[in-house]
Image (cartoon, rainbow, N blue to C red):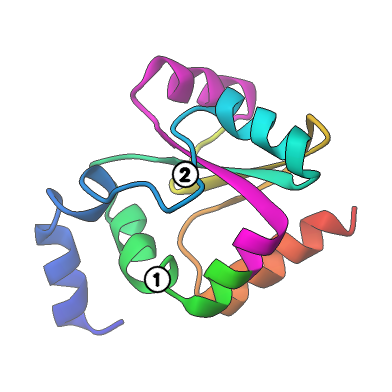
């Protein structure tokens, strides 16, 4: 990312993560996603993000929009997107020791598998998620 892009992302604090609607099939609570995953047999991916987080906004703009990522996530996961400042976000932060955003928590059959945190490219993100699933 060049210097101008970084400066623009720093100035864009009021966009994307705060205003982006939930992707189709995603939930705004962990419980909603967990119930849907139980019925579908899929895993759960919880994205914990912060409105003030520049990396979250960059992820939304540059990675979340990838057809490759969308296809993989939709085929394998039920998703939830939780803001870090909400009661549920605070609980997830404490329970799963989230220290960087965005943070992606992966669950299989209700059991925590692991987390991927911080900004990554599409391929880096997919590689990290797939590596967790091999555990």
Say left or right for 49 vs 53.
right
Tell me the tag on residue 88.
none
Residue at the bottom extreme of this rendering: 2
| Residue 22 position (above or below residue 4) | above
Looking at the picture, tell me which residue is in the foreground, 9 or 87. 87
Count residues near mark 2 (Cα–Cα under 10 Å), then give few for <14, some for 14-19, many for 20+: some
Residue beneath the point at 45% across and 49% down: 102
- Quarter holding the N terminus is bottom left
The disc, 1 or 2, on the residue closer to the chain's N-terminal end is 1
Say left or right for 25 vs 75.
left
Residue at the right extreme of this rendering: 135
Residue beneath the point at 52% across and 17% down: 91
* Residues at marks 1 and 2, CA–CA distance in whole angstroms: 21 Å
- Percent position of residue 115, x then y: 66, 46
- Percent position of residue 82, x then y: 43, 34
Q: Regarding mark 1 in the picture, which secondary structure is present there?
A: loop
| Residue 86 position (above or below residue 96) | above
| Residue 97 position (above or below residue 106) | above
Looking at the picture, tell me which residue is in the foreground, 91 or 75. 75
- Percent position of residue 95, x then y: 62, 21
Q: Is residue 88 magenta?
A: yes
Residue beneath the point at 27% across and 55% down: 54
Count residues near mark 1 (Cα–Cα under 10 Å), then give few for <14, some for 14-19, many for 20+: few
| Residue 113 position (above or below residue 73) | above
Q: Which residues are magenta?
A: 72-97
Say left or right for 66 vs 13.
right
Q: Which residue corresponds to mark 1?
A: 65
- Percent position of residue 130, x then y: 76, 65
Q: Which residue corresponds to mark 2?
A: 100
Q: Nearer the viewer, mark 1 or mark 2?
A: 1
């Amino acid at each position: 990312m060049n210097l101008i892009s970084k400066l623009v992302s720093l100035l864009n604090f009021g966009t994307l993560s705060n205003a982006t609607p939930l992707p189709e099939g995603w939930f705004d609570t962990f419980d909603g996603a967990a119930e849907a995953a139980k019925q579908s047999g899929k895993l759960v991916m919880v994205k914990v993000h912060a409105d003030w987080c520049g990396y979250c906004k960059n992820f939304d703009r540059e990675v979340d929009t990838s057809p490759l990522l969308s296809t993989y996530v939709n085929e394998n996961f039920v998703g939830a997107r939780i803001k870090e400042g909400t009661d549920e976000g605070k609980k997830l932060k404490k329970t799963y020791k989230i220290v960087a955003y965005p943070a992606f928590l992966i669950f299989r059959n209700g059991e925590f598998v692991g987390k991927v945190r911080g900004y990554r490219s599409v391929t880096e993100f997919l590689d990290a998620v797939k590596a967790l699933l091999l555990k």
